[in-house]
Amino acid sequence: MAIRVMLVDDQVLLRTGFRMVLAAQPDMEVVAEAGDGAEAIEVLRATAVDVVLMDVRMPRLDGVEATRRICAQTDPPKVLILTTFDLDEYAFSGLKAGASGFMLKDVPPGELLAAIRAVHSGDAVVAPSTTRRLLDRFSSMLPSGVKDPNQKHIEKLTEREREVMMLVAQGLSNGEIAARLVLSEATVKTHVGRILTKLNLRDRVQVVVLAYETGLVRAGGGTG
């Protein structure tokens, strides 16, 4: 079945360009469009969507708040933030709000299509190392790990899972984690899957964000 995509951007010309690129793909279908976040939420009430391409700077309701409201729903679509700068506050806020990743608006068509497919399959489309750079820059906006309510969820993890989580949060791939801990890559993948399940997270990007929120990882790459 084709991936059902929704385009949310206040620039009609930009939506038209994205729609033309997506329409040429046999495994994708643009099923809805909206000019701002409020309209997007309204349209989603009546339309089944798999992936939302979400602009951040829009009138009425911006993409960050729209993402937050969408991701709070039951079985929400995946949200891919579109931003102008890769290290800006909007991208940071979008990830915090629950987006599965972010892409630059001038991304080559092939990369955009690959990102949509990756998000749809459950993967993150932002490397954890990039997410870490973003969080390092805006870490002052994160709550203190001491009082963060998510801390109790971290306690569900085994010692090994906690170790793996910290390495994921430091930007290491499964292969790099396997080498560091002298484990097989399949075992690391299993640990990552259990971490996502226990913490109710969708992807590795959210692992990185949570690690910062709870103080497991600190700005500059240190561990808590």
Image (cartoon, rainbow, N blue to C red):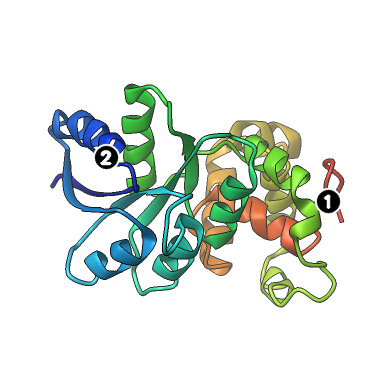
**Residue under the image location 61 percent in, 32 percent down:** 175
Which residue is identified by label 1?
A: 218
For badge 1, the amino acid type reads Arg
- Percent from the top left, x then y, of residue 121? 34, 46
Q: Is residue 201 above or below residue 191?
A: below
**Residue under the image location 81 percent in, 56 percent down:** 140
Residue 116 location, quadrant: top left
Sequence-wise, which precedes: disc 2 or disc 1?
Answer: 2
Badge 2: few (under 14), some or many (20 or more) residues near its Cα, within 10 Å?
Answer: some
SS label for mark 2? helix
For badge 2, the amino acid type reads Arg
- Percent from the top left, x then y, of residue 97? 54, 61
Badge 1: few (under 14), some or many (20 or more) residues near its Cα, within 10 Å?
Answer: many
- Percent from the top left, x then y, of residue 187? 57, 45
The quarter in which the C terminus is drawn is: bottom right
**Residue under the image location 76 percent in, 43 percent down:** 137
Residue 206 location, quadrant: bottom right
Q: Nearer the viewer, residue 205 or 168?
A: 205
Which residue is identified by label 2?
A: 15
- Percent from the top left, x then y, of residue 161? 67, 57
Residue 199 location, quadrant: bottom right
Q: Is residue 58 left or right of residue 199?
A: left
SS label for mark 1? loop
Disc on res. 116: none
Q: Nearer the viewer, residue 141 or 167?
A: 141
